[in-house]
Image (cartoon, rainbow, N blue to C red):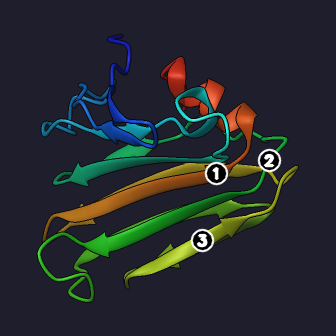
Amino acid sequence: MPKIENVQREATVFELKPWKSIHDTITKPMVTGLGPMEIPESALAMGFAHITAPDILGSPTHIHPFDQWIYLLGAENFADFDADIEFTLGEEVLKIDYPCYIFVPKGTKHCPLNIKRVGKPFIFIDASITQEASYQALNNKE
């Protein structure tokens, strides 16, 4: 898997360099800000993907030692969301067909994110505030 190779342009500005997802259904390049791996004073790591087809992301079910936020937004108009998704959070399977964000508290079992149907492309954003999350993104792991 290719490494994320963002380019530092200013002391606190990084150019996001695209990289290819491990998922064949994600055909457009992804971008990821690595937070403290790039800017030591920062703790925010965020990854962005353009989703156009059904897939299963984040499998198997797992736990992180940090909080995580997952955003699902319409790609052209954030509020125009046309997809059917099931997301395992703890013991629940959430059924999502609307734009949202999902808060995953540290230590909570979660995933997979089962994208069952995509009527219109949408944006998937994964955000965490921690050095562990940045290290995980740097090593291109889910």
Please indicate, yes or no, whether residue 54 appears anywhere in the rendered image: no
Res 63 quadrant in image? top right
Pointer 1 local density, CA inside 10 Å: few below 14, some 14–19, many at least 20 = many
Mark 1 near mark 2, Cβ–Cβ under 8 Å?
yes
For the residues marked 3 and 2, what is the alpha-carbon distance in whole angstroms?
A: 14 Å
Look at the numbered disc 3 and give the secondary structure of its residue. Answer: strand
Q: Amino acid at mark 3?
A: Ile
Which of 46 and 69 lies nearest the eye of the viewer? 46
Pointer 2 local density, CA inside 10 Å: few below 14, some 14–19, many at least 20 = some
Q: Residue at x 64, y 25 (%)?
A: 135
Which of 134 and 30 lies nearest the eye of the viewer? 134
Relative height, residue 67 to residue 118 (above, below): above
For the residues marked 3 and 1, what is the alpha-carbon distance in whole angstroms?
A: 12 Å
Res 80 quadrant in image? bottom left
Res 15 quadrant in image? top left
In the rendered structure, find residue 102 and report the number of the disc placed on it: 3
Label 3 vs 2, first from the N-terminus = 2
In the rendered structure, find residue 66 and report the number of the disc placed on it: 2
Q: Amino acid at mark 2?
A: Phe
| Residue 122 at x, y percent in the picture | 23, 65
Mark 3 near mark 2, Cβ–Cβ under 8 Å?
no
Pointer 3 local density, CA inside 10 Å: few below 14, some 14–19, many at least 20 = some
Per the image, the residue denoted by label 1 is 128
Q: Residue at x 44, y 37 (%)?
A: 11
Q: Quadrant of the N terminus?
A: top left
| Residue 142 at x, y percent in the picture | 54, 32
